[in-house]
Amino acid sequence: MSPAFLNLIETVLNGLMTGVMYSLVALGFVLIFKASGIFNFAQGVMALFAALTLVGLQTGQIPFSHLINAVFGTDIHNWGDGMPAVFAVIGTMFVMIALAFLVQKFVLRHLVNQEPIILFMATIGLAFFLEGLGDLMWGSDVKVLDVGVPSGGSFWWEDVTREWAAEGSDYYGMYIDKLDVVAAIVAIVLVAALTLFSQYTKMGRALRAVADDHQAALSVGISLHTIWLVVWSIAGFVALVAGIMWGAKSGVQFSLSLIALKALPVLILGGFTSIPGAIVGGLIIGVGEKLAELYIGPLVGGAIENWFAYMVALAFLLFRPQGLFGERIIERV
Amino acid sequence: MNAHVQRVGTAAAPAPGEVLLSVDNVSLSFGGVKAIEDVSFDIRKGEIRAIIGPNGAGKTSMLNVINGFYHPQQGTITFKGRVRQAMRPHEAAVSGIARTFQNIALFKGMSTLDNIMTGRGMKMKRNLFWQALWAGPAEREELEHREAVEKVIDFLEIEHIRRTPVGSLPYGLQKRVELGRALAAEPDLLLLDEPMAGMNLEEKEDMSRFVLDVNEQYGTTIALIEHDMGVVMDLSDRVVVLDYGKKIADGTPDEVRNSQDVIDAYLGVPHE
């Protein structure tokens, strides 16, 4: 095989795996949007908050330590040596469930039957609040997240692919990050688990029922508040997974919340109401931007990756606003 | 819920008499618009009670009040001997009121089976943890309820569309699935909002038969809104007539048919 062709394969593979990372974020949006019609602007910040909490628990940081020190003149930072990754993940999950409960109790409960735009504004407020809370609780320094997920290039894959190149060429082999592979596997397991849950359990059925028709769901005795609590908890869990993967990849820093912006084109492509759409949309965006960088990049001076996704989204908004898998909205007039 | 299963065997409905639900001096308005004005009537156990009236008479609003979607500004609702407080709609369902909607409100993306299973939802007790594992007790419970749902499916003769997403079904069948979902909850009171609207004659006859069978075999008390007077007169034990939010007649089909107020309401009164 020629090096050019191998380059193409490498680009596609890396694109697919980047795409999976986008899908992870987009998935959280879709879950909440389907069940409650709320576009949750805070999803990206939830991922950041989850990652911050995870690192904080794992390294044994005392929450609000800066604030406490400033007010009481103390000098506390840590309690002991923290806890193993497994417990920290479980602890963070409880924090995310508590967060879902508080959001439900103090925000959404009071906004039932309001216009979608008002709910959207509320989630923007929530995003700013969470970002500030995360800063106050855990500090704003860039943190290293290490929960034992392997990372770095795979030498084995490099060796294998070097053999594929034509004899005598100076091909070095493909670079694939082990972390990306793990992320892809985690995403597949996550989607499979969510699908099974929603297809074969009472709660899953209730979730689908609420997504389909609020009024009918109420008439068979489904409590919207309970469902929203469950949905926000699941979205919190998805945010945690996304936070772990992105945090392990690029460090836990506040710019992490901006990955939510990358999820937007994914959603526009895949449709806001479709879980498969979020996955396929993520993959298309991931592969698309890498390929564009490889082939179109040199013509325009590179850095195409940063805006390619948004151009695709723009094209979709013009020609197919409901996305690839979204339900077409037909207004009766 | 076991009482229901036993009742299937005994073909006779309990003799009407005891009041199941009573509506007393209920008024409901939206801003300045009075949807219901000082209406009182009762629904007795085991009867089929029709609510009729011209368009905009407040019939559906009345069902929404009974069902907890709307909270009346004045008046009380007494259900099973207890005066009801303002409640959330899902609590009405839990207390034993099931309903169907004028414009079918099914879960369109889900299969017939899943739609009817949602009707069993509040009878399923296993918590989220067990369901997440879908193990042991939760699995057994799921199967038990599947059996109850299969009975409803047999009863309504919709075996052949068990796995079909309901969104793709013809209108008449969708109405039947919606009835099935309400039946699966084994309600004490079943509210039917125009169960035969938009149906052809044959479908109407089928639906009438189901309504009667539900009432006779399961002993379920039924309140229905319907525009087809033939159907109403054939099916119902007693009829309450609303016009512009006010009650203008209440009695047996024959009494109502001969009431001058009712005739005026439907045909209009000539201007003097």
Image (cartoon, rainbow, N blue to C red):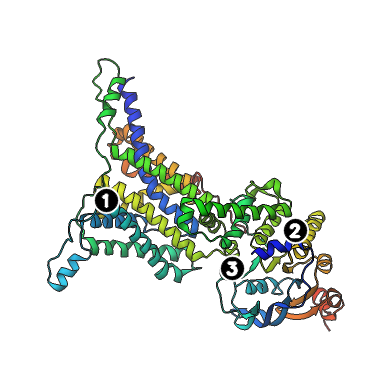
Observer-nearest of A319 and B53: B53
- Is B16 above or below relative to A237? below
Q: Secondary structure at mark 2?
A: loop
Task: Write down the chain letter for disc 1.
Answer: A
- Residue located beneath label 3 in the image: B94
Residue B26 appears in the picture as rendered: yes
Marks 1/2 in contact by CB < 8 Å: the verdict is no
Q: CA distance from mark 1 to mark 3?
A: 42 Å
Q: Residues within 10 Å of mark 3 (few under 14, many from 20)?
A: many
- In the rendered image, the quadrant that contains the N terminus of chain A is top left
Which numbered disc, 3 or 2, marks the residue that appears first in the sequence?
3
> Residue at horizontal 65%, vertical 66%?
B98
Query: x%, y% of residue A212?
Result: 56, 56
Q: Type of residue at label 2?
A: Gly
Q: Quadrant of residue A23?
A: top left
Q: Is residue A247 left or right of residue A24?
A: left
Q: CA distance from mark 3 to mark 2?
A: 30 Å
Query: x%, y% of residue B180?
Result: 68, 57
- Residue located beneath label 1 in the image: A85
